[in-house]
Image (cartoon, rainbow, N blue to C red):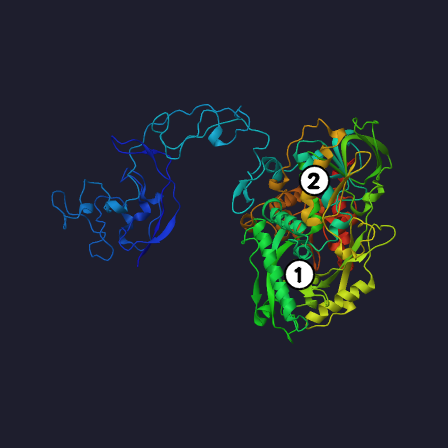
Amino acid sequence: MRYTVTYDVTSSQRCGGAGEPPRRVSRRRPRLHPRPRLAAYDAHRGRAPRRGLPDDDLPHLVGHAAAARGPDDPRVDRGRPGHRGRGRPLPPAGRAPRRQARADRAGPAGQRAVRADRRARPRAGPALPLRPPRPLPGADPRPGRAGAAHRAGLRRRPRGGPCRDGPRAGPLRPRLRALRAHDDRRRRHRVRAGAGDARRADPGAAAVSAGQPPPSTRITAGLEGAPREVDVLVVGLGITGAGVALDAVSRGLSVLAVDAHDLAFGTSRWSSKLVHGGLRYLAKGQIGVAHESAVERGVLMEVTAPHLTRPMPMVVPLTSSVTRAQATLTAVGLRAGDALRRGARTGAETLPRPRRLSATETLALAPALRRAGLRGGMLSWDGQLEDDARLVTTVARTAAALGAVVRTRARVLAVEAASSNGAGGLRVGLRDELTGATTTVVARAVVNAAGVWAGDLAEEVTLRPSRGTHLVLRAAALPGLGTSVFAPIPGETNRFVLVLPQPDQTVYVGLTDEPVDGPVPDVPEPTEPEIGFLLDVVSACFARQLHRSDVVGAFAGLRPLLEPPAGSGGSTADLSRKHAVLVGRSGMVTVVGGKLTTYRRMAQDAVDAALATPAAAGLAAGPCRTRTLPLLGAAPRAELAALEQHPRLVRRFGTDAALVLADALEVTGLTEDELLAPVAEGVPVTLAELVFGVTHEGAVDVADLLDRRTRVGLLAGDRALAEPAARRALALAAHHLPGRR
């Protein structure tokens, strides 16, 4: 069988013979297809025969002796493949060729020697005279109209339909228009938003995604230059507070978001770095929470942050300690989780379906597992974050790029109603933690998203914090681990210890769920009993016994869970993770509970509640747009894989990786090699991202850079190695800090 490559030439001219209505040549893609009887020069079909065009403007097919002749030369005989006469000159004029009865070999001079039923399209007619271009204004005055199909002077018409002005002339001439504000920025991509339908990314995000924002839209520290009157003031810049700021500003409201410390200072940076679908909540009968988690997981992975998330395979090993009944229950639970995925309209290409594994397949995915007693495993898929603190920072950057004022090192002292009836808004006392200066801001609505510290501002809110502890191991401690492992906890049917490999050659092991009493610390500390518990459970599943010396780092976070009703009892692990939105006597809205995966829905509910308060009456706010609003740097996974930037920058910044490097080049004057090299041996952090953390993300000290803009601080040894680079980045970018420009 003979294969030929067909290049269908795309033309912008009208074509058609005499007496025929003009037709547009259809656009087709190159294709590879078998045609045993196809003529030899189909690479050139669609071109007028020998009109003085050079023969080298289209590719020649290698191996044809007659390639030097024009493909449509009437002197070339287009015989069938395999015939001796293929490619020979035609007989002189007046002499009829052999097999005259073949209709496809008869015709006037210049007719293509291809059977009529194999001709792709009519032959192009002679070129028509050019028509002078019409003027085009810079923008269509009609509201909501943009793009070539809606420009002034053009009308939408069916594809291939006749032009109202008659046959179009040759190739379209360039047309001039006035430049608009964001014409120098790359157009956004199409992103997947639901079960297979592609939607255009939000134009507001497109306007701010590729270009470098002005200094006023960057995250800064302190209150210098902050507005004194806003529509919405957000307290707290964890994932919930950053999400509230993005939701409010995307509705067209003026926003001031503040935090007493830094971005992701609290619980948001101490998570398991997972975007999970709520399978555990389904096992407890919390169907609404599980469905909400699955929906928000799909939104995060397919629309808002595909650059910061990735599908994570997870294996549940069926060891000798797992009974047949427990294995059956686990399989049913994983199938129910897949039903949640389908109900949330998340595609199987994002999260494949679960299946049973043999013992050999299980060991191929996790060679470090204990072989004795291993019957096989269950393979399922969930979402994993590149970094939870990086997600918070990206959400805050997106809000700032859309116009929100985001300030760290700004502490809220008090919130009170501006008038007795609440119609005058709320007065918020703020203190600049850099200078000590105090100020008052009047806001129409205030959202308290301070997490475990929310009760300090809202006395009516009573929380019962729960501590979750994680360990950090080197990858060499569990060699060859290519997937996450969910180690069953003895005596529990729906709780596991998670073993999560990370891209930086570390492994996270977690997590616990212990109640916390007393004052809430700024940085929670893991306890030795929790560390020992995690090591024991993991060692029961793996061949190598883990010791305390294998732990190179540990961290703990506090979950802001609502206090259950009196007399309900139970542990904190049994408390619902459903979020709650409460409105206080002053009119301040407090949002607590929930989890990182559902931050967007929590923010939407909080803003809806704030707009329903009497003080916010009359605010012109649009509907929530964050479900289809990509974060800065977001792009389809195929486009991200094709980027030629530094792999670490692409993983952490997406399409903004080029912006990170360009900013560092401009600020420091160093070479790319210096900016992209690891800051120390075994520490993959680059100087470029440290500089960007200072200039665009509000970092003001070494702790901001190493503990929250990057996660080097999770390992004490690596942190000590990276501190000189952090100080150097602060010195190089000092003139970009507020007050030093």
Depth order, front residue of 594/291: 291
Q: Secondary structure at mark 1?
A: strand
Amino acid type shown at disc 1: Pro
Q: Is residue 407 visible?
A: yes
Vertical side of 489 occupied by 620: above or below? above
Residue under numbered circle 2: 605
Q: Secondary structure at mark 2?
A: helix
Q: Which residue: 55% across, 57% down?
A: 352
Ranked by sequence position, the earlier of labels 1 and 2 is: 1
**Residue 434 numbered mark, or none:** none
The total number of labels drawn is: 2
Quarter placement of the C terminus: top right
Q: Which residue: 28% across, 39% down?
A: 122
| Picture coordinates of residue 407, whole percent (x, y) | 76, 38
**Residue 501 numbered mark, or none:** 1
Q: Which residue: 63% across, 63% down?
A: 330
Quarter placement of the N terminus: bottom left
| Picture coordinates of residue 37, whole percent (x, y) | 26, 54
